[in-house]
Amino acid sequence: RSHMGGHILRTAWGVPDNLTTAISGPLPCGFCGCSGVTECAVTFKESRRSVSWELQCPHKENFQYGSTDKGSDNCPCHNVPIIC
C-alpha cells in the first residue's frame, strides 16, 4: 500500500512518474490506482467489537485491521481506513 501511495502522491503533486497504467480520478484505489471502478469500492462493516472491510480489487493485499488500529511503541501511527 505504501508503494502505491507514493505513485498516488506523485500524481497528485504533478511529479512525473514512470507507470504502465496512469493513476486516475480524484479518489484512486490504494491497491491499483484506478478510480471509479466498482470492484475497488471499500465496504466497511462495524460491530460492537471490530471493524471489517471488503474489497474486490484484483490487486488487493490482506492486512490485519485490528493490529494496525492499536499501533505500538515503535510505530504509534494508526494508518487505517475509517467509517465517515
Image: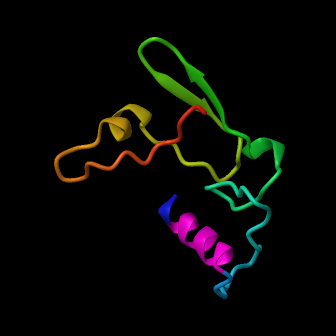
Looking at this view, name the residue that lies furthest to the front. 84
- Return the x and y of residue 8 as percentages of the image width and height: 63, 68
Residue 35 percent location from the top left of the image: 78, 56
Residue, x 67% and y 88% (percent of image)? 16
Vertical relation: 14 (above or below) 8: below
Percent from the top left, x then y, of residue 84?
61, 33
Residue at 37% from the left image edge and 45% from the top image edge: 78
Comparing 65 with 78, the one in front is 78
The residue sitting at the left extreme is 73
Between residue 61 and residue 84, name the one nearer to us: 84
Q: Where are the magenta residues, as a range?
A: 3-13
Question: Which SS does the magenta portion mostly show?
Answer: helix
Looking at the image, residue 49 lies above or below residue 31: above
Q: Residue at x 59, y 22 (%)?
A: 45
In the shown orientation, is residue 79 left or right of residue 43?
left
Magenta span includes 10 = yes
Q: Which residue is painted at 42% across and 37% down in the image?
A: 64
Q: Say which quarter of the image contains residue 49.
A: top left
Q: Is residue 67 left or right of residue 40?
A: left
Left or right: 35 with respect to 6?
right
- Residue 58 part of the magenta segment: no
